[in-house]
Amino acid sequence: MFAEAPNIVAEEKKNGSGRWVGASLPRKEEDRLLRGRGKFVDDIKLREMTYLRFVRSPYAHARIVSVDTSAAEALPGVVCTITGKEVAAQTQPFIEIAPDHAQKIRDFPMAVEKARYQGEPVAAVVAESPSLADDAAELVQVEYEPLEPVVDSEQALLDKSILHEEAGTNRIWTGIWEFGDVEKAFQEAAYVVNIDRMHFHRFSSTPLETNVVIGQWDPKEDRIHYWCNNSFPAFAIQFLAAHLAVHIDRIRVQTSDIGGSFGIKITSYPQMSVCALASKKAGGRPVKWVETRSEHMISSAHGNERTFRDTRVALDKNGEITAIASRHIDDCGAYPRYEPLGCVIYSQVFCGTYRFKNARIEFTQTVSNKCPVGPNRGYSRMQHLWFLERIVDICAHEIGIAPDEMRLRNYIRTEEFPYTTPNGCVYDSGNYPKMLEVAKGLIGWDDWKKKQADARKQGRMIGIGIGTTLDSGTNNFGQSQIVNPNAPFSGNSQGANCKLDIYGEVVVAVGSCPQGQGHETVSAQVVADVLNIHPDMITVRTGFDTERNVHTGMSGTYASQFVVSGLSAVHGAAQKLKAEMKRLAASVLETKEDDLEFGVGQQGPEIKAKSTGKSINYWGLANIVNVNSAVLTPELQDVTLNCRYIWRANFKVPDKAKKYGNLTLTYSSQLHIAVIEVDRDTFVPKILDYVAVDDCGVVINPRIVEGQVYGAAAHGIGAALMETCAYDAVGNMLTSTFSDYTPITAVNIPNIRYGHISTPSPFTYSGAKGMGEGGAAPIHTISAALQDALFAQGIFINNSFNNADSIFRSLKYREGGQLAEQVRLEKR
Amino acid sequence: MYPRSFHYHRAGSLKEAVSMLGQLGEGAKFLAGGQSLIPLLKLRFANPEHLVDLNFISGTSFIKEDSGALHFGAMTRHAEIEHSALARMIPVLHDCAAGIADVQVRNRGTIGGSLAEADPSGDWANALITLDTTVHCLGPNGTRAIHLEDFIKDAYTTALAHDELVTEVEVKIPPQGSGGAYLAFKRSAPVYPSASAAVQLTMAGDVCRDAAIALGCVGLTAIRATEAETALRGKSLNDKTIATAAETARAAADPQSDMRGSAEYKRQLVVALVKRAIQIAVRRARGEQIEGAHLYA
């Protein structure tokens, strides 16, 4: 009665617990994906398909004097062209989330009057083939008048050259977070550490599959159909409906397999707009746009870049941090788009893993003539967590406490969970000292300390660094009201549907769009436990589709939450289905509901009456409801065996004025330790040993979690040592190819040893906590290890990106951070 | 992106390829392994009207030993050299072939194509210039043999005429007591090195009788570090003499700052790479079998 026979490896048993949840089940998706049978957007071929190519600005900041598309239009095989001006004439600017003056920013999917970053689309051509589109794009003549570019956020604040004249300033948003009694804490401090400037660099994710959109705006039906790999489609359609002035019901978005997103594909809605408008102009023919790698590097989305100014840290005589004061300046690139949400999202982890109560952070965001940012894995929290980890190591060094001991003195105590942070977030669970103990054990801390001391005598530069981090997941969209009191968002929700199809197949649909996270597998594990059947007896429909009707306005796959929002919705739908099946089976089998047993019999999944031994299989149940309904008794008329469930998080709207409230439901934690040696000849920072310990509460599928930890660790190591989105002084992007950006590859990834502890979340039905982003632990850890290696040389690791070249220059030419000049200890 | 449209021609013999290019004129180019040309076509940095494909000509891919030299057919893939027992007779060749880019590139890229491209960041010219290497060419007027020093003229410029191609690369087997090494520093596998060093020594006991040292990616062509060579010749090699020689290579390099590293850092790398390459070459000259691995960030 189910479509496919179970093909699962026989020895893959439930983990002793009698449950599928917790078992290292191989992923249901693997067979398809590893054999090249996945279906990605570019695999979709439609009749009368056309191909779109963008013409992009070579300048970071320039007035567009004229755009001449006549030669392109004259080329045989060209269907149409479309310019920024045409787009602006037909659409409303995208919604701005920021309040006040930033509301005046006019953000269109293509440059209209001005280009504001190198690579910004200025026009597009649509042709019968991709290569003809490339030919035509070369024929579009654009005349530019270059303007002064702004490539640094502190320079942007001077407003000498303004990107968005309508807004009148490059400053998008400023807010102050102040909690406790900061002044008093500084007055009473035994030590005050002053740190001039630190900088978290701009990097991105490099998903194997770039952004791809097929858009079709059928004039006959007046509806838009998208096949795309946007990773937050429910958000995209809200932006697009307002912008294109169409009923949101008239936009259908379908995603299929997605080759990675890491948050970067959330902001592909501008390109989605252009594909629809181009399709309309092309008479309703489908328009496909496949982003090239270089386009992806210069114009998809980058991660937020942040500068930390004038940091002051108060400590008591035991080295416990009592207060932090600092000024943060975030650079969101040319258009805010998803921003300024990052200006509040950082505060989900306001105090990191630490228990200080007093803090004052002034947070400002500016635009600059660089690629707009998007929610890059570890979004906005990793910058802040890196900042806190740097503070902890610098303070420990200045007052002479070992970095592990310093952390133990400052970590939130295990008995304090659930812990309310100074800004009202509630950390659900955690055990940071235990993670440190496990990580130290795995790496052989004492051994390495001895080896390090011996090596130092020979002049070798070896450092051991700890990075503690948080991966806050399932956010309260109410935090948007802290940046804009009028933002109509709060809470969090996800939808799922669980049904018996006409022949009794168990089919689950969920409003997520996985990009490798294994949603098919873990959803099947959850439902298998509810119905007491095998996960292979369950079909899970992943990939977003507005017409499946299982989404809410927050559906998508982002922000470390599927295990909470997605699986809670799946679990809820399965429970609902089970309740209906029970009522129906009790009636048919003429027994009481508590006499029923769910399981698998000779005719597949079934429900049995324990008292009589009579049973009915799923086909029998589905048959009654779907095609034999005259036999249904009146009290069972509401049974559909087709159950939709919307899960909602139990959040309140935060106090906007005080910036106080619970912003996230779960807090996974990670603790990494790295041992790094800086080679004395090549200055290459070589990772000698690496340990990653993870705590995401109850684990649904250990194999998937472990895979996520390795992936996040590789991404973070790449970011710390290899990957930076570099621009020159006039805004030319210097890393527009993989040869220049050098995403991490297998030869660069050290052997990572994995450890795990589990502190179940009291706030989720399963005890699980979201963990997909990983908190960028390697960036904190590698900075810590390099700092430990280079303290003796007087070097201050004040940047999150360090490579052999930068280490060489800071040692030989004193170009980087210098402890003596930039860090100052006051003893009271 | 997609290349501009071009006419594709498949040559049946090297002679035919040469005559095709002559007839098709300046807008035509040879296509060997395509590991430089295809990306340039895709980015539309190169826009030839005609491509003459050399990949289907038989007898152009071989490795053989003859008259005290190794002979490589121009279309011999890097991977074939990497896995050739014969090529291991000259360790520099194995080091070089095994470290070029990644597996895909090594499976397609050819030694002849690499030399004819004369990319300043290419590996082969730098490795081979420390050896006695002759490039055999074929043009409309017949064959000629050009010593590698005379073959590479400048960045992306060789002694080849437009319709002339490389047929074979001949490398003299170094005398007994020789050892060599080729080391490159790359930020990740698929990218060009930030800097590379090739070293070829002839030793008599601990004394260096002869030395050839070349630096790659730090000038318009591979650079011979002649002062460093002089610093080794006739000397008993130890940590100190090796370090001193390596240090003189710093000034020989003429690098540019780019994403692969600042000019100052590349000079530092050159010193480190030369030092390590000498150390490996000395041990190999003694007959030790050791792998010289590239360095990665």
Image: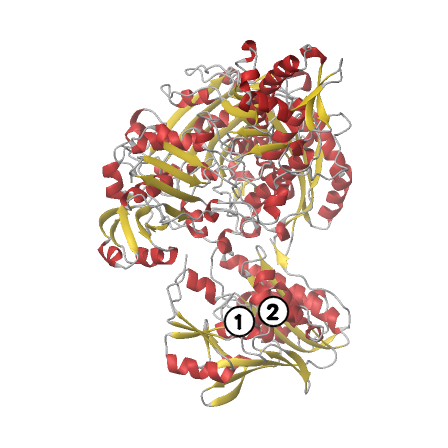
Tell me if label 2 and label 1 are in contact, CB under 8 Å. Answer: yes
The image's mark for residue B78 is: 2
The percent coordinates of residue B277 (x first, y second) are: 66, 66
What's the coloring here?
secondary structure
- Please give the chain letter of the residue carrying mark 2: B
| Frontmost residue, A535 versus A136 | A535
Look at label 1 and name its amino acid: Ser
Residue under the image location 30 percent in, 38 percent down: A108
**Badge 2 element:** helix
Most extreme residue toward the bottom is: B141
C-alpha separation, residue under disc 2 versus residue under disc 1: 10 Å
Image check: A505 left or right of A441?
A: left
Disc on res. B114? 1
Q: Looking at the picture, does residue A52 appear above or below residue B212?
A: above
Count of marks placed on residues: 2
Packing grade of label 1 (10 A; few <14, some 14-19, many >=20) is: many
User: x and y percent of residue B72 in the render?
Assistant: 61, 78
Give the left or right position of residue A47, taking residue B224 as reference: left
Q: Earlier in the sequence, mark 2 or mark 1?
A: 2
Q: Amino acid at mark 2?
A: His
Image quadrant in which you'd find residue A353: top right
Q: Residues within 10 Å of mark 2 (few under 14, many from 20)?
A: many
Q: Is residue A734 visible?
A: no
Instruction: Tell me which chain the residue with mark 1 is part of.
Output: B
- Left or right placement of residue A748 versus residue A202 in this view: right
Could one spot residue B291 in this view of the protein?
yes
Q: On screen, A775 above or below A717?
A: above
Quarter in which the C terminus of chain A is drawn: top right
Q: Nearer the viewer, residue A359 or B45?
A: B45
Foreground of the two, A488 or A797? A488
